[in-house]
Image (cartoon, rainbow, N blue to C red):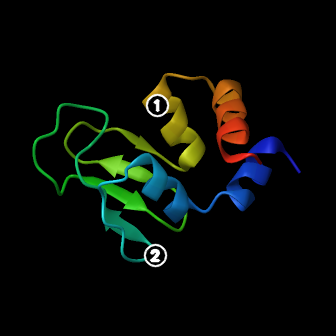
Amino acid sequence: MSNAELIKRAINPAEFYRHELPGVILKKQGWNDGGLCPFHDDNKTGSFRLNLTSGAYKCFACGAAGGDIIAFVMASHGLNFTEALAKLIDDWRV
């Protein structure tokens, strides 16, 4: 099993986003309102969506999108794939 597969199995996307976006109320599996987009100067909710099943995210205002929590860490911290894996392994003690 690759490190990416291990991370995806070990870190629940709902718990990840509750930690990363603490002010956001996440209620259900599947797509949720993600609050203000962390990738641009957003001032109203509704355009940033999170998928709590897959970890995918999408902002309909700025176009930021990714398929899982690894992509979110890469985009939000300016890391490459390997660096994002290392950060998740370290932060979540995987």
The residue furthest right is 1
Looking at the picture, which amino acid does disc 1 mark? Ala
Q: Which residue is mark 2?
A: 29
Looking at the picture, which amino acid does disc 2 mark? Gln
Which SS class for mark 1? Answer: helix
Residue drawn at x 71%, y 27% as measured from the top left: 82
Residue 89, given in percent of the width and then of the height, sits at: 73, 40
Determine whether 74 is above or below 49 in the image: above
Label annotation for residue 75: 1
**Cα–Cα span, label 1 and label 2:** 23 Å
Which SS class for mark 2? Answer: loop
Residue drawn at x 16%, y 54% as measured from the top left: 45
Residue 9, given in percent of the width and then of the height, sits at: 73, 60
- Specify whether 62 is left or right of 32: left
Considering depth in this image, is 82 or 14 the residue closer to the camera?
14
Q: Residues within 10 Å of mark 1 (few under 14, many from 20)?
A: some
Determine whether 75 is above or below 29 in the image: above
Determine whether 18 is above or below 44 in the image: below
- Specify whether 28 is left or right of 73: left
Residue drawn at x 20%, y 52% as measured from the top left: 47
Residue 88, quarter of picture: top right
Residue drawn at x 44%, y 47% as measured from the top left: 20
- Specify whether 4 is left or right of 35: right
Q: Residues within 10 Å of mark 2 (few under 14, many from 20)?
A: few
Residue 43, given in percent of the width and then of the height, sits at: 10, 42
Marked residue nearer the N-terminal end (1 or 2): 2
The residue furthest left is 43
